[in-house]
Amino acid sequence: MMVELGKVCATPALLAVVSNDDIQRALRRHEAGDSGIVSRSDSLMNDSALLAGERILSEYKSREGIVFWIITEADRSLTTALLPDDY
């Protein structure tokens, strides 16, 4: 099931340390419903959130090993790529 992303943005801190290619790759995975490296329970919650219209959180690693998140809001109006410390 595809995730409707809405407006897509990224935090300045993420843009400073993660390549645009890594962010774009992660956004495509997130949009396709691939939550990345989240826990099994978070992955199951994302599956439910797709159906229930709730917030979706995915977690990925850049090629340099930097962990970052992509969050799509419940109303699907906004998707934000960010570092965990940005939250």
Image: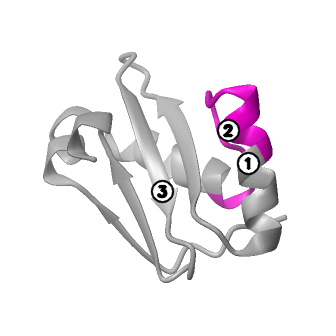
Q: Is residue 43 magenta?
A: yes
When asked about the image quadrant of residue 37, the answer is top right
Amino acid at circle 3: Ile
Which of the marked residues, 3 or 1, is nearer the chain's N terminus?
A: 1
In the rendered structure, the answer to whether residue 12 lies left or right of residue 1 reads left
Reply above or below: 39 against 12.
Answer: above
Residue at point 23%, 36% (across, down): 85
Which class describes the residues within 10 Å of circle 1: few (<14), some (14-19), or many (20+)? some
Amino acid at circle 1: Met
Amino acid at circle 2: Asp
Label number found at residue 87: none
Query: What's the magenta region?
Result: 31-44
Extreme-top residue of the structure: 65
Label number found at residue 71: 3
Residue at point 57%, 73% (across, down): 74
Q: Are marks 1 and 2 in contact (CB under 8 Å)?
A: yes
When asked about the image quadrant of residue 52, the answer is bottom right
Q: Nearer the viewer, mark 3 or mark 1?
A: 1
Which of the marked residues, 2 or 3, is nearer the chain's N terminus?
A: 2
What percent of the width, then of the height, locates residue 14? 24, 43
